[in-house]
Amino acid sequence: MTLGIALLGAGRIGQVHADAVAACTNATLISVTDIMAPAAMALAERHDCQVRALDDIAGASNVDAVIIATPTPTHADLIERFARVGKAVFCEKPIDLNLDRVRACLSVVADTQTTLMVGFNRRFDPHIGAVRAAIEAGEVGTVEMVQITSRDPGAPPPDYIRSSGGIFRDMTIHDFDLARFMLGEEIETVCATASVLTDPAIADLDDFDSVSVILTTKTGRHCTISNSRRATYGYDQRVEVHGSKGMVSVKNQRPLDIEIATASGYVRPPLHDFFMTRYTQAYEAEIAAFVKCVQTGSRPSPDGNDGLMALALAEAALQSVTGGRQIPVSQILEPRP
Amino acid sequence: MTLGIALLGAGRIGQVHADAVAACTNATLISVTDIMAPAAMALAERHDCQVRALDDIAGASNVDAVIIATPTPTHADLIERFARVGKAVFCEKPIDLNLDRVRACLSVVADTQTTLMVGFNRRFDPHIGAVRAAIEAGEVGTVEMVQITSRDPGAPPPDYIRSSGGIFRDMTIHDFDLARFMLGEEIETVCATASVLTDPAIADLDDFDSVSVILTTKTGRHCTISNSRRATYGYDQRVEVHGSKGMVSVKNQRPLDIEIATASGYVRPPLHDFFMTRYTQAYEAEIAAFVKCVQTGSRPSPDGNDGLMALALAEAALQSVTGGRQIPVSQILEPRP
Amino acid sequence: MTLGIALLGAGRIGQVHADAVAACTNATLISVTDIMAPAAMALAERHDCQVRALDDIAGASNVDAVIIATPTPTHADLIERFARVGKAVFCEKPIDLNLDRVRACLSVVADTQTTLMVGFNRRFDPHIGAVRAAIEAGEVGTVEMVQITSRDPGAPPPDYIRSSGGIFRDMTIHDFDLARFMLGEEIETVCATASVLTDPAIADLDDFDSVSVILTTKTGRHCTISNSRRATYGYDQRVEVHGSKGMVSVKNQRPLDIEIATASGYVRPPLHDFFMTRYTQAYEAEIAAFVKCVQTGSRPSPDGNDGLMALALAEAALQSVTGGRQIPVSQILEPRP
Amino acid sequence: MTLGIALLGAGRIGQVHADAVAACTNATLISVTDIMAPAAMALAERHDCQVRALDDIAGASNVDAVIIATPTPTHADLIERFARVGKAVFCEKPIDLNLDRVRACLSVVADTQTTLMVGFNRRFDPHIGAVRAAIEAGEVGTVEMVQITSRDPGAPPPDYIRSSGGIFRDMTIHDFDLARFMLGEEIETVCATASVLTDPAIADLDDFDSVSVILTTKTGRHCTISNSRRATYGYDQRVEVHGSKGMVSVKNQRPLDIEIATASGYVRPPLHDFFMTRYTQAYEAEIAAFVKCVQTGSRPSPDGNDGLMALALAEAALQSVTGGRQIPVSQILEPRP
């Protein structure tokens, strides 16, 4: 059975998901929706499918699932809307910038028993997946310390930063999810430091560009995260997991894997300079996993709760920076009355 | 303008080319032909195109080009047949195992002014292409010594070896082409050694599995080639070019790029175990280059002469092994009366 | 002029320093002192020098300098004693476990204008030194984020831990010094997390074995430190400095630099399993630098203040773990009345 | 018992051996001999030993062994002279440039039952030794193909080349010995190509600077050697052994093991630029092995026959270049009457 999918949002990430659907043998792109008509039309033409208004999707019998790739403020409403009409939902992170709104949305998802997968693409990268598989196979023993280094080639434009919820909710959120994916235990405390080092304009937007975080779990496992909005040498994406028997790490990927040796030394080209070229395989595997979940009725992973938890960690990190202290995650999840 | 392509041969490499055509935005697969009807049908269904008999292609106005992926003995006849009716031709290497037959075929190609590209896929690998680009950019100065290490994960089945023309014409031929691609000068002499080390059954087939070759050019540049039919750690594909200013090399690729460190040491997974996963990008780029050549009327590379030269080097290598001496390539190309 | 040196302490690290003096062309080992007579005699014999009682060193005219490699509780007294008689002093870290005692000792050093170098050997490792040189040459631009990963092959014996002052004062203290060496600015805050993951016996000693630390400077630079008392794959010693123009990192060293590729993958041997084999060159360079300082009258680096600062950071880290909050270093250095 | 050693030759390699004797706990340098008196005196002073004339060594009861580090034309005479008076001999390669002279010399060595070790230092490099140990431990199965890449940072001065016997006897000779060390079978045929690519002045000296060689053994194992007199990126020393179960290789060594990543890519510093810094450990281990042989009466390795065989391979390579054909080693060793 081929899954019929409606894509909401024809922007950069929407295009990535459209390609991923096209690469998926048991799914087909039925329609593209975007308030920018030319964008929707161009993408629909490329994938030989329809342009549809939002109102024409809910009732469409050939649409089994929607992919939400619209701006963040619309996510929760769209999830609820399509959950209520029985469509499976894949939604880009975050569900919402507000934790209460996320909780309310997840409650609708729970009531409707909708399949909801949240877009943490890195879990589907084959190399990162192999790290997790090595952990599960016991190759490094009991996990003790995780180190995540994640640096973007450059900061997004000011308009994006302004509405992104800040670096913790926009960028570190991926690392929070990855930390949970690797630690094998729920995170209990968050301690974060943040500063502006790459561009003073980011301070004017009340955001940070350089972030260090320590997470701890119940049994005392640690995870450190090191983020920067700018790395001259490309998109730096490393994860390293140290355990009782050893360490497993994922290597950075480069588009051209050559080396030139001269009197100046041995030079390899820079890394990928864009998340879309670095994670091409991950985006395809992510949609394939979503399609499989819907078709087999299995539990999606990452699900709505994973989206909630990563956002809660971002919230805790922000409070930690402000208060100069370690924040218990429970304080975020179960606020005192 | 979209190029209409007929695929001849629905076997393993035919399927690779069909995928490559599908990935090419300005080409479309019109039909699949194979004497094994079920294979043709399965592939046609996958790519939503027709199954056609050979006789129905030559006159088809929507077919601009053919991809020849049939067994070697049919190559030269098919090239001539489609050259004569004005179709552009992409043909898998080798054109023929017999040099005179190749020459006769290329003469038809020349007379008909057909576009003929020969399938040396490695030239289109992005990493190998980056090595060549570095040479052309002068980053290693004047080329002096090229080293090619090429080992297959395992030998092909006996039936394949029996009709392949032997290791030099079947496997080393890729390295001969690569040597020419990198040396920047035509090869003048060939000195080769060959033995059977991995499996005595290969000796029964009058073939070798382990080969070392030295090539030289007019100005004294060298290239060494080291081949084995079997490498336990995967598909070993290395090229290294040493020049007056430095050295450039291409790294081996692995599907999972992680590292596990334990008391036993640091372990990375094996390499790709198959040429199709190693050279996926190369196969796509190869067909894209062919399509571009046909559409722009530009000169194909590698062309028929490249196919001829690689085969001549294989012939010279075989004579060198037999005679225990260095063979001038001119002796192969212009045999004494 | 050859510098005459008296070595105090003939234990493991004393032997390392004796070798370093022997390798130094313009210094000579005059005597060895140890309360364990056999140890002193063995070392003196190996280096063809005298065994002397402590009281016979202060007045010896052929002794220009002392190397203090005795147990920590004796360090401050010995520094003061030899400072007062005009001997130059090289002292193993830490000067003392108590900050006030360190301050008092440094006051004597200042009054006597003695040359005092403190033993942070890593600054003298050629690879780590090359990282610092690259920073000073501007190759990575303005320093922004430093990451230090430091893991010992295994925990020291309980008796050692009991008197070591704990992991921060014994092990992380090297990383605190390295952080200061790389950050290029004084550290302002310390945030640390610590747990016992490798061996419950360490908890019984009121110590930790797994530590994560974030340091910040005045302009917002960060440094993260990740420590474990146990790494199965050897002595893991990495430093990585990210700046506005790029990143510089030091690679781990292994005694046997080979690689074996089989069907199981590509394997390199484990790292050095001991600080003395990893830092052999550093220990020699350290003593050579000390000798040069004394002979040229130049300012030693690291000096007593560097010893004080690293200890203060250890103190702050401990308070941070206890209080669950970020500790300003000023609070340690200038305690409120 | 401490072995008393007389060093003959106080030049560059003589100094290396003097240092190696100094580092050896059970040997002592008794004297230095050199026709250049100032060189002998300087080295003797540095090692606190005597300067002696050649005639004063043979009868010296405190001299157990001699190290011959004089110019090549004196080697065979000196070996014979000291063999006849019962001194053990370590001699730098080659024993002589003339095979018959070598044979005559080895006959004296055999008659006198002298311990003779020949200086092929690479066998004692810990990394290369680990490759051999891996082979012996069966980690790569049966050896099939060996690849040796050996490039010097730059050519020696014309005067050196003039008397060196040419690149095969001077430089490739080390690789011939290494090939024998790794192949595990005696070499049967040699096929070589040689040209002048780096400096026309080398052609004026009737020598080559760029060499490729294929060696084969009785069972068909191959070894390829690639040599250049000049590599801009340092002293390139690689060995790779492919066998039935896998491959083992030794990595190049660099004095500073850091990496700098910028917008231009990831850069590591060049390799060692001198054989003495690359092989410091090897030279020490070599003399230690010689001392041990003499003291235990065990068979030296490499011995005189190893010196003979490497020279015979050089001779065969030269004939192969001249004749354009593969040369059986037996033809060199047992010339037809």
Image: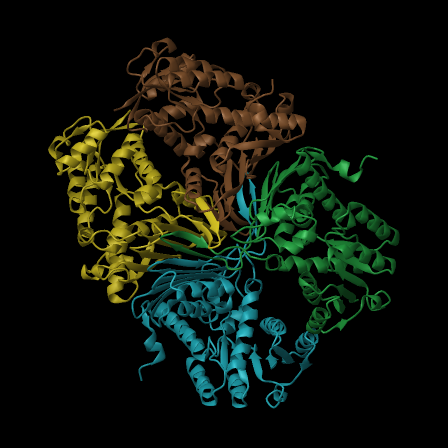
Chain colours: A yellow, B brown, C cyan, D green
Q: Is residue B203 among what the camera can see?
A: yes
In the rendered image of this protein, does residue A55 appear above or below residue B240? Answer: above
Q: Residue at x 34, y 64 (%)?
A: C142
Q: Residue at x 76, y 72 (%)?
A: D50
In the rendered structure, the answer to whether residue A10 lies left or right of residue B231 reads left
In the rendered image of this protein, does residue A164 appear above or below residue B215? Answer: below
The outermost residue toward the front is D204
Q: Is residue D147 among what the camera can see?
A: no
Where residue B171 sits: x, y (%)? 53, 28
Residue C158: image quadrant is bottom right
How many numbered marks are there?
0
Closest to the observer: B114 or C52? B114
In the rendered structure, the answer to whether residue C186 lies left or right of residue D60 reads left
Please identify the quadrant where the N terminus of chain C is shown.
Answer: bottom right
Please identify the quadrant where the C terminus of chain C is shown.
Answer: bottom left
In the rendered image of this protein, does residue D131 appear above or below residue A42? Answer: below
Closest to the observer: D125 or C219? D125
Where residue C30 sits: x, y (%)? 64, 81
Closest to the observer: A241 or D223? D223
In the rendered image of this protein, does residue B281 appear above or below residue B263? Answer: above
Where residue D316 sits: x, y (%)? 71, 39
Q: Residue at x 25, y 24 (%)?
A: B1
Where residue D278 sits: x, y (%)? 59, 57
In the rendered structure, the answer to whether residue C309 lies left or right of residue C156 reads left
Closest to the observer: B170 or D142? B170
The outermost residue toward the top is B55
